[in-house]
Image (cartoon, grey):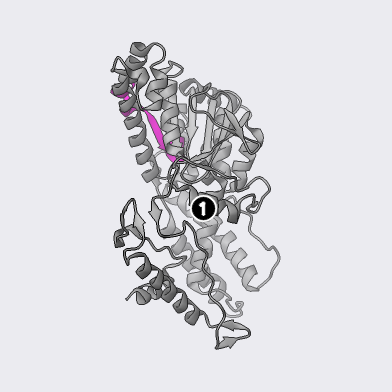
Amino acid sequence: MCCRGGRVTFDLYGPLPTGTTVLEASAGTGKTWTIAALATRYVDEGLADLPQLMLVTFGRAATQELRERTRERLTTAARGLAAVDAADSADQLVAYLAKTDRVARRLRLVRALSDFDGATIATTHSFCQRMLDGLGVAGEREPGVSLVEAVDDIVDEVVDDLYLQQYAGYGSPIPQLTPATARTVAREAVRDGQARLEPLAAGDTEAGQRVAMAAAARIEVERRKRKRGIRDFDDLLVLLRDVLADPERGPAAAARIRERYRVVLVDEFQDTDPVQWEVLRRAFHGNTTLILIGDPKQAVYAFRGAEVRSYLDAVRLADTHETLSVNWRSDPGLLLALDRLYGGAALGHPGIVVHPVEASRKGSRLHGQPAFRLRQLPRRPPLRNGFPALPALRAQVADDLADEVVRLLDGRALLDGRPVAPGDLAVLVRTWKQIHFIQTGLD
């Protein structure tokens, strides 16, 4: 490892992590690649068999990608170690692994690949389901209980009933919520069952009715789920958390889980919620090698209960906190410009700071165009209270963007030595409503 700007940079080819380690990885620094490489090293160096590793990420699509990337990394490493000159390989990981016991290490990788279908590479919810089954507490889910991914249909049904009960009767308060708003409020409250509902004692104001609807929906949805024999994935998380937190059963349950896994690697850790982090902490922290990789600046799943404070709590408890400091995706000019714009900024918390990253590339792929430009449109009449009308302003932005697109495509800007083509361009908008303005401007 080395230091950059007062931060400890993680060295993939240094001693393998033990205890609890948090790796902070900005966009483009290779989170998934690092996890696959670490898994390869743990297996190759004989520290854990593949079934003793657990790789966790957020969402099924990400899980499938992590599975494919890990299999690919194991395969290329095994193939590379088959060469007698593997120590001189252009693949840095293969060259590192070939320094000692090349034949024995390759045999470990080949054996791992033959057992790869039995590897635990899963979402947190899937992990919880497996652990509950393995712990023998599946009976607590009650015979005949069905597992479903979501209960939005039950939530909508509950809200329709509650809305009529609260506002349809004679003398009922005037509703400050539309039925559609009530459904949205209830869905968010049920999905994030750990969130506090505020403000309290707000009466029949809109805020008060939102809180009342959310609280009532949580209770009634839970009642109907149990009556119908339905549980969702979040129920599994809570159930496993409660098992691990139980003073009598918890220690034995955690010990059984640790017997199975020697190393646990968690990708996209910034998107975990408090219950997920509590499960991981109670099961593995302080007893198992636990590696948490994420970027708090990219925490985007608050609407599903993710809480960046779980990441910050992990940093506080971790034995080691290091960073991935090399960006493998972007040109150095763009990274320098973004660092000038955002560098050192604390994003809502002093523990979430934008740190500089180093570009792996040494030059720009785009010539005839600055790496980064910030466009500003002046205020022009007609103004309303000193501000232009929003639709007119959006149209101006779209026209300005269209002019930039035409300029890029006129042949003077070169990408990797060739003229920029339409397929090289991407236009990002904040909401789908802005797409119409962009399309009109480009037409």
How many numbered marks appear? 1
Q: Main secondary structure of the magenta part?
A: helix
Q: Residue at x 49, y 51 (%)?
A: 333
Inspect the image, locate mark 1, and give the three-letter code of the amino acid beneath it: Val
Residue 303 in the image: state x and y as whole percent. Answer: 52, 56
| Residue at image point 45% right, 48% down | 331
Residue 142 seen in the current view: no
Q: Quadrant of the N terminus?
A: top right
Quarter of image, res 217: bottom right
Q: Is residue 309 left or right of residue 412?
A: right
Identify whether 337 is placed above or below 244. Answer: below
For the view shown, which residue lies furthest in the bottom direction?
A: 382
Q: Give coordinates of residue 367: x percent, y percent.
A: 39, 55
Q: Residue 364: percent from the left, percent from the top?
A: 42, 49
Is residue 381 at all visible to an observer of this figure? yes
Relative to residue 200, is residue 100 drawn left or right? left
118 in the magenta segment: yes
Residue picked out by circle 1: 300
Q: Is residue 253 left or right of residue 66?
A: right
Vertical comparison of 125 with 407: above or below = above
Q: Nearer the viewer, residue 413 or 62?
A: 413
Say which residue appears at 29% left-offset and 60% top-offset.
Answer: 421
Element under label 1?
Answer: loop
The answer to whether residue 258 is magenta is no
**Furthest-right residue in this view:** 201
Query: Which region shows up in magenta?
Result: 112-129
Residue at image coords 47%, 71%: 180
Within 10 Å of the Cα at label 1, are there few (<14), some (14-19), or many (20+) other Cα atoms?
Answer: few
Expressed as whole percent of the image width and height from the top left, the position of residue 226 reads: 47, 49
Judge by depth and name the residue closer to the eye, 69 or 188: 69
Q: Quadrant of the C terminus?
A: bottom left
